Image (spheres, helix red, strand yellow):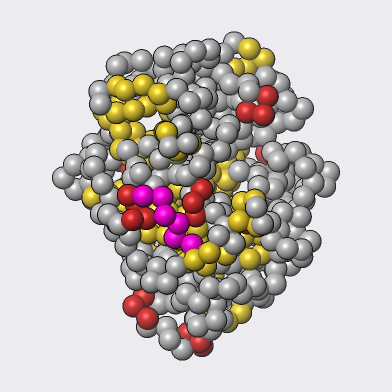
Amino acid sequence: MCSTPPRRGKSSARSMCASKRGAAASPTRVAIAVRAKTFACAWLLSSAAFATGTEFTTPHRDDAAGAQSVSFAGQTFVNHGLVGTGRLSAQTVDFLGDTLGSFSSLGVDKASWRRVGDHYEGVLWTLPDRGRNDPGAGLFYDYAARLHRFRIRFTPYTGRPLPADVASQNQMRLVPDGGRELRDVRGTPFTGADPGAATKNIGGTLFPVPAQGVGAGKIAIDSESLSFAADGSFYIGDEYAAYVYLFDGSGRMRGALVPPNAVVPHTAGKINFNSLAPPDSGRRNNQGVEGMSLSPDGTRLFVALQSALVQDTARAGDKRDASGRVTLRVLVYDTAQRALPTAPIAHYVMQLPAYTSDGDGGRVNRTAAQSEIRALNAHQFLMLARDANGLGADNEKPIVYKSVLLADTEGATNLAGGVYETGTESVLRAQDDTALKPGIEPIRWTELVDLLNPTQLARFGLNLETKPKNRPLTLSEKWEAMDLVSVLDPAHPDDYFLIVGNDNDFIARRCVMQKQRCDSEFDNDNMLLVYRLTLPGMQAYATRKR
């Protein structure tokens, strides 16, 4: 059953669904979801009244069995639906002897992707985060940063529903095929351990480096986003420092892209990269560079924080509100001439949905933070926004919101080089309100894919049932990875497969980390969902064999 339409918020900004350059002034042309006839819950909203902040108080579900289209920025985008799934056991051990945890991010080697009869083959790289940990107990491992490599074989499926069994999630087959351990500019491995307040100047850049204990002397990295360049080099976005690191094809770090002052975490006037105590300004704890993507032609690097900076978080009374983290920053760098530019050429804000964690119709109390982005061209991107419910959350709360958004920066206010970038001034109108200051237009977006589609999930044996908790066929909590590959259909050149992956947090009944046991009470398998989309504004990828 579909959810009710999102409630209107307080802001007077334009509709997120309006067409580019104000072309959609008529309310009849502005829709949050204009779907095919199979979509039973379409609704229309006036662009003058629709809020920049969207709220979901009950589960936002979509029962459409077939294709759905949305008009956005003068073009028609189509979600043809879920066409495949993949599952890899949570107990899989990786090439370094640790439990294989994925997928904080992923990327298909575009040069390897090919169509063979009724199926596709290629190489998939995936990125784990900082390893198994328990921040509340101060437990961290000296987990070495790495990439996992897989050989993949994908056979799309649109037939009758498959049995409700784990064996039904087999359209995307993953075969582990080694990987790369990452090294810093000194040739030293990274660590996943929290750095505390300690820092070290290496080659003129200040890095988070634990001074003692686990990981002492190594650069601490919590890897969350991955994007490959055509020459085989790649970028990784980090949570601790909110830096973006550039690596060569062998996995050796070439340098770091340091964010503007507004993003760097400061406590009592000093840089502090720890992830346990909140900073006074800058990126929130564990809310760093969650989304990062090169444009397909390699000329633009998009960098998105997971949710609002501390100074952009609305307060409820004397406390910062978890539903007040909707206003995130999106930076854009020109990488046409320099792989590590010194400053962004564009700096935008975007407002995410808020939701009610219990899904019971009550007051919103959470932000559907973004977990990944994928650039379509120099001004449009896909963004994955989600709640924190589902398999892995270890509770029975209903799954409320998990969607892929389609965003366009055209028409948004560029804050690059101004006080919101060089200082710590908030973009909010008031401390207790998520509305933006006058003159700041956010990035517009619309929803393209709702992952909470029980009809399509059931075709592959999956469901949205969270009671009882931690059952293997329940949709996972943390969907954090995305990539796009061509369908390679000359009759449909704008069609792409969107591959979406979960982060299973290394939760496995039989878990090993740094030769130590880290067993859980249930398995949270590594999962992939594959959708077919029509993306008319998508640029062609520049590819080279890796």
- From the viewer's perspective, is 113 left or right of 468? left
The spot of residue 462 in percent (x, y) is 69, 49
**Residue 234: which quarter of the image?**
top left
**Measured from the top left, where is residue 92 in percent x and y?**
60, 24
Picture layout, residue 155 above or below residue 448? above
Q: Residue at x 52, y 22 (%)?
A: 193
Quadrant position of residue 348:
bottom left
Judge whether 269 appears above or below 494 on screen. Answer: above
Residue 180 x %, y %: 39, 23
Residue positioned 55% across, 81% down in the render: 49
User: In terms of depth relative to the viewer, which is nearer, 429 or 93?
Assistant: 429
- Residue extending farthest to the right is 468
- For image coordinates 69% across by 61% down, the residue present is 364
Q: Which residues are magenta?
A: 423-428
- Please tell me whether residue 425 belongs to the stretch shown in magenta: yes
Residue 91 location (% of width, % of height): 64, 24
Identify the residue at image location x=51%, y=48%: 310
Q: Nearer the viewer, residue 438 or 195?
A: 438
